[in-house]
Image (cartoon, grey):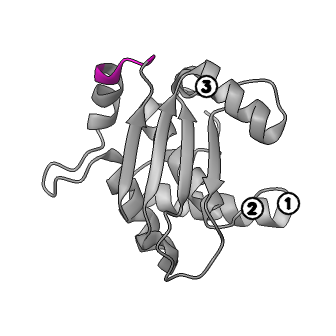
Amino acid sequence: MAVVVQIADALDADTIEQHLAVFAEADTGEGFFERCASAIAACDGDPRLHREICVRLCDAAESKTLNRVFRERDNPTNVLSFATDQGAAGGTLPLGDIAICWAVVADEAKSQNKTISAHVAHLFVHGVLHLLGHDHQEEAAAQAMEGKEIEILASLSIANPYLSD
């Protein structure tokens, strides 16, 4: 799966790259998001995972605007997913876009005693699962989605994000 990463101009790209570099795979040349994407594909196996995903690392203002326009909520949020379609596995369109708000993620990671890279990995996995049609509106669906997230993150040696310290 190809992952295209965009970093908003308002963010410090060098700082972001330093946080994400701890997860890059030096041996294979896989970057942070590609490594996470490979773990998702290995654990999930959905044939749509060969399609491209765009990740936008945005600031709080952009996240707030996206959240207001698409979810009618007037606040920034940690992650938003925008699926291009729910069509056939052989489709050529990108799977979708994921917007991750760096400021919200950094604040959440600090308050939850997590590394920023582990929290970004969790939110990327969460976002990709949304692109694949998973949701957490009903309790059973939420538990199934969380189970997949935990399994995928464990394959990356990231602790269960739903356990509190």
Instruction: Tell us which disc is closer to us: 3 or 2.
Output: 3
Q: Is residue 134 above or below residue 121?
A: below
On residue 139, which mark appears?
Answer: 1
Circle 2/circle 1 CB separation < 8 Å: yes
> Which residue sits at x=33%, y=55%?
34
Q: Where is residue 37 drawn, in percent x and y?
A: 41, 59
Q: Is residue 10 visible?
A: yes
Magenta range is 10-14
Instruction: Tell us which disc is closer to us: 1 or 3.
Output: 3
Q: Is residue 23 above or below residue 18?
A: below
Between the C-alphas of marks 2 and 1, the distance is: 6 Å
Q: Where is residue 129 drawn, in percent x and y?
A: 60, 61
Mark 3 residue crowding within 10 angstroms, few (<14) / some (14–19) / many (20+): some
Mark 1 residue crowding within 10 angstroms, few (<14) / some (14–19) / many (20+): few
Residue 48 vs residue 46, the one in the foreground: 48
Between the C-alphas of marks 1 and 3, the distance is: 30 Å
Residue 13 part of the magenta segment: yes
Under circle 3, the secondary element is helix
Q: Is residue 130 above or below residue 20?
A: below
> Which residue sits at x=74%, y=60%?
135
Under circle 1, the secondary element is helix
* Mark 3: amino acid: Glu
Mark 2 residue crowding within 10 angstroms, few (<14) / some (14–19) / many (20+): few
On residue 62, which mark appears?
Answer: 3
On residue 143, which mark appears?
Answer: 2
> Which residue sits at x=66%, y=58%?
146
Q: Is residue 74 left or right of residue 47?
A: right
* Mark 1: amino acid: Glu
Under circle 2, the secondary element is helix
Q: Is residue 66 left or right of residue 23?
A: right
* Mark 2: amino acid: Gln
